[in-house]
């Protein structure tokens, strides 16, 4: 495995008195796609927020490119090269699509490079070009997701944190968006940390996966091998196998507890 | 006609102060009740520059706007940043308290008499039997100019668009690497600077004293509500409507209605169209 560009060690993050992340560690190798799977409330979003600096961990460290970035302000983290695509898109509703994209490039000074990247992004998502002057709030959910991803790309980040890109989208759109995510990774060499509930899609897309349950990492492996595991199949992919006696065992337990 | 011009001018002042309310509210979700006292400070600083130091009116104008603007940014940095996340009530009390402090400061520094600011706008034009005083015209044109500058700034500069973005979605602005805290301070600076400009423009009409901001701020608040709190054109329109109502009510209705009529209209407005003139119901798409 390549050298990790992002190394998270033993972070603990709280919402007030409630511990949301209980000592999570993981590595994201440069140029890879890493996914964190987990159900509702497992703490996936909190992990991303801790990395991008929106939330501060009580303990542990986040090292990006050899530099500790935990407890840094989110705008500083972003300037270092980590773009966060938040859950639920969070576009600027009353700005036009083009203005939204320009805001993505807020930290950049090279006008030529920005214009070039704008074209690249329009190449990935032609629909955004067609709607460039429209208000972002008037876009459909899928288009807003495309805009959110594009906006993050406009900063030319080294790492993109992608939070639930499939949320509320049709299966066809989800497939399209994941294809683009892979293209962005392969063509531009952008490292991607993907958080998903749609385990099937995430495992097919990513190289390496972590499974997060109630604030802990309970499993870590390459996505290929994760897909073969019984527990993953049963609890995350929903593939049910008949037992030897021809009945399904309803009381089956997860083996990692 | 005379009344219309005067109402328009007074309304412009309300509009400018309301604009300050709205800018701060949109960006930081705080309501700054010290807005009227910033207006008063602006007028006093200009007075000090022109009368005490003998500077040119325009230089004094510039000094006052810049000084009060910088003071607004400082307020945000030092005081208001501490109360973000506290209940709204705490912020309301804090800004009201700050306003009282500014008034005390002003009476200690400049005294509690009533002052006249000498301005270059003393003449009148008579057009078709209507007297247009330069004072009132200067308010209207000053407002127009200021609005034009602000409009261009918010729509055509990088930092202006970033301010819009920040007020629409603060978290996302952080994710874009926009220095949100700095933007807040800048918005405070703009609001305070606009209030100062309004105070200086108003000075020849109401004269300068430490309480000049109070009544203006209250009516400007009404104007902001009338326009649909959160809408910038709404704030200006609201201000102008309130100014016109006030003057017409003063001229045509019995004594006492001058000051109450704007609020009566506001009440009716809130019953008929609670979102205000330009209010928009924000909807979030999922």
Image (cartoon, rainbow, N blue to C red):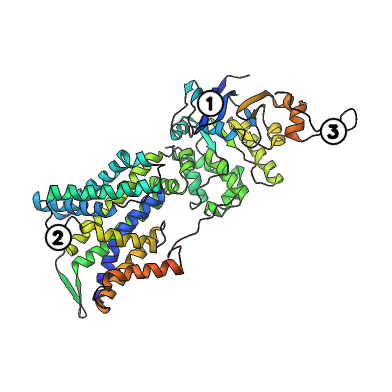
Labels 1 and 3 within one chain: yes
Residue identifier under label 1: A12
Q: Residues within 10 Å of mark 1 (few under 14, many from 20)?
A: many
Instruction: Tell me the chain of label 3.
Output: A
Pinpoint the chain carrying mark 2: B
Residue A95 coordinates in the image, percent (x, y) = 48, 51
Q: Is residue B242 left or right of residue B282?
A: left
What percent of the width, then of the height, locates residue B101?
A: 22, 47
For the residues carrying marks 2 and 3, which lies nearer the camera in this image?
A: 3
Observer able to see residue A102: yes
Residue matched to label 2: B119
Horizontal arrangement in the rendering, residue A13 relative to residue B83 (left or right): right
Instruction: Tell me, for residue A248, which label it has, or none.
Output: 3
Where's residue A225, x and y in %? 74, 24
Q: Secondary structure at mark 1?
A: strand
Question: Where the C terminus of chain A falls, by quadrant?
Answer: top right
Question: What element does badge 3 sit on?
Answer: loop
Q: Within 10 angstroms of label 3, few (less than 14), some, or many (20 or more) residues?
A: few
User: Is there one chain holding both mark 2 and mark 3?
Assistant: no
User: Can you say whether A61 is above or below A86 in the image?
Assistant: above
């Amino acid at each position: 495995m390549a050298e990790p560009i992002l190394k998270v060690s033993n972070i603990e993050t709280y919402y007030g008195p409630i511990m949301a992340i209980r000592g999570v560690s993981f590595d994201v190798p440069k140029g890879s796609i890493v996914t964190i799977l987990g159900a509702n409330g497992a703490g996936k979003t909190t992990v991303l927020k801790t990395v991008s600096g929106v939330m501060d961990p009580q303990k542990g460290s986040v090292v990006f490119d050899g530099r500790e970035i935990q407890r840094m302000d989110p705008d500083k983290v972003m300037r270092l090269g980590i773009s966060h695509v938040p859950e639920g898109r969070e576009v600027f509703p009353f700005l036009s699509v083009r203005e939204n994209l320009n805001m993505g490039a807020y930290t950049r000074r090279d006008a030529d490079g920005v214009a070039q990247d704008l074209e690249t992004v329009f190449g990935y998502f032609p629909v955004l070009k067609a709607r460039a002057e429209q208000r972002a709030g008037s876009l459909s959910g899928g288009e807003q997701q495309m805009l959110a991803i594009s906006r993050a790309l406009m900063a030319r980040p080294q790492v993109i944190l992608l939070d639930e890109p499939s949320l509320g989208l049709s299966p066809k759109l989800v497939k399209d968006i994941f294809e683009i995510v892979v293209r962005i990774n392969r063509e531009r060499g952008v490292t991607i940390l993907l958080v998903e509930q749609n385990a099937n899609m995430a495992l097919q897309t990513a190289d390496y996966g972590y499974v997060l349950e109630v604030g802990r990492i309970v499993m870590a492996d390459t996505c290929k091998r994760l897909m073969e595991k019984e527990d993953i199949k049963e609890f995350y992919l929903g593939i049910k196998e008949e037992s030897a006696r021809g009945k399904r065992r309803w009381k089956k337990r997860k083996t990692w507890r | 006609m005379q009344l219309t011009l005067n109402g328009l001018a007074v309304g412009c002042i309300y509009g400018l102060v309301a604009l300050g309310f709205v800018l701060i509210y949109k960006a930081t979700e705080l309501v700054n009740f010290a807005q009227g006292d910033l207006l008063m400070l602006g007028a006093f600083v200009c007075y000090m520059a022109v009368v005490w130091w003998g500077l040119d009116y325009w230089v004094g104008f510039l000094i006052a706007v810049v000084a009060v603007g910088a003071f607004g940014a400082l307020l945000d940095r030092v005081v208001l940043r501490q109360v973000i996340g506290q209940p709204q009530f705490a912020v309301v009390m804090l800004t009201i308290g700050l306003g009282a402090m500014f008034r005390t400061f002003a009476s200690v520094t400049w005294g509690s008499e009533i002052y006249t600011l000498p301005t270059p706008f003393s003449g009148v034009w008579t057009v078709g039997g209507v007297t247009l005083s330069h004072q009132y015209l200067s308010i209207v044109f000053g407002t127009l100019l200021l609005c034009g500058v602000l409009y261009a700034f918010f729509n055509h500069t990088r930092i202006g668009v970033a301010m819009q973005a920040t007020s629409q979605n603060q978290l996302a602005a952080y994710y874009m690497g926009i220095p949100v805290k700095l933007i807040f301070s800048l918005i405070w600076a703009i609001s305070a600077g606009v209030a100062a400009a309004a105070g200086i423009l108003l000075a020849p009409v109401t004269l300068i004293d430490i309480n000049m901001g109070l009544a203006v701020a209250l009516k400007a608040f009404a104007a902001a509500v009338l326009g649909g709190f959160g809408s910038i054109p709404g704030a200006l329109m609201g201000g102008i409507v309130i100014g016109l109502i006030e003057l017409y009510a003063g001229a045509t209705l019995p004594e006492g209605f001058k000051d109450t009529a704007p609020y009566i209209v506001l009440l009716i407005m809130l019953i008929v169209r609670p979102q205000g003139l330009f209010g928009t119901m924000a909807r979030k798409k999922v």
